[in-house]
Image (spheres, rainbow, N blue to C red):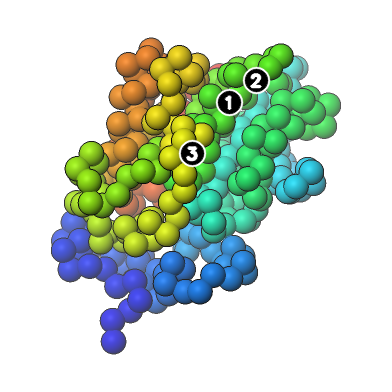
Amino acid sequence: MAAPQAIDPEILPRLDPEYVAFHNKYVAHLVPPHSLPWDPAIRKGDTVPGSAEVLSVGSVQDYHLSHCKVRVFTPEGTPPPDGWPAYVWYHGGGWTLGNISSENAFCSRLCKGAKCVVASPDYLEDSFETLQWVFDQGKSLLGVDPTRLAVGGSSAGGNLAAIISMKAAELKPLPIRLKLAQLIVPVTDNTALHTDDRYPSWKENANTVWLNTGRMLWFLRRTEWDNSPIFAPDELLAKSPKTWIAVMELDILRDEGLAYGERLKKVGVPVSHKQGNVLSVGRELVSDAVENLAEAFGTL
């Protein structure tokens, strides 16, 4: 009997042999969550099988907000005179999966490599509250410099980071000016389907590893701009901060991520992007994200 997430024969030749070995060890035997009856306990499982080790940082502490917890990673050493720069990270999981521990390894690398405080919320519904909390209380509570803030996220978390970067610029009476938004394999268009031609990667990678069309359609939500940022009006989109977008060659979300980058460029937002293969997620993409964030914060 084939493993529940066995690699599709058409995809297999396009994968790096090292990833194939990784997938067969950590992923192939797992039953896809979208094929199971819904159970809230599913959020407690690993969203990133085979994740790297968590690096040692100065401190890791959880804080309780009104509806969720936030995990805060603080660098080692003495903070700069004006405080640490701070980065709010939103984990992936299709707005459904994942928890406060899902991406500890990645957060620890950003904290250590970019020399910044990293705050990552548990529930994504409270994503904007987390940024507001860091902005309002970060200086006194976390030793943060509120003039050096950035946001980022992967997949559904990248979707939230894009939306929050615009909401932050619209905040009254005092907008939150972000130094950077990092969008890693972001969902930018929740109206995308495998049956349309706007984003060829949906058809090209329909049976790809991990996030195939079956799983993605299980995640899809509404179509307003605050769920599909690619539909944001130009005047709002133009308020987005400098943006770094990372996409993967075999990802169904590849083309909508690139299309979002083109929309940002057209309204004058500085955009850079990286396209890699599957292994880049665990290797050079992480180091590139750290370097990009450190450059934005001036901590290189």
Judging from the image, what secondary structure is the residue with disc 3 in? loop
Q: Position of residue 75 (x, y in %)?
A: 68, 36
Name the residue type under label 3: Asn
Kindly identify which numbered label has been placed on residue 167.
1
Tell me the residue that label 2 is attached to: 171
Q: Where, quadrant-wise, is the N terminus in this rendering?
A: bottom left
Instruction: Specify the quadrant of the image occupied by residue 110.
Output: top right
Instruction: Specify the quadrant of the image occupied by residue 186.
Output: top left
Q: Position of residue 93 (x, y in %)?
A: 50, 54
Indicate left or right for 169 with 260 as reference: right
Residue lying at the far right in this picture: please name it.
140
Label pair 1/3, CB-CB below 8 angstroms:
no
Kindly identify which numbered label has been placed on residue 90.
none
Label pair 2/3, CB-CB below 8 angstroms:
no
Tell me the residue that label 3 is attached to: 227
- Determine the residue positioned at 75% across, 17% down: 81
Judging from the image, what secondary structure is the residue with disc 2 in? loop
Indicate left or right for 159 with 273 as reference: right
C-alpha gap between disc 2 and disc 3: 18 Å
Name the residue type under label 2: Leu
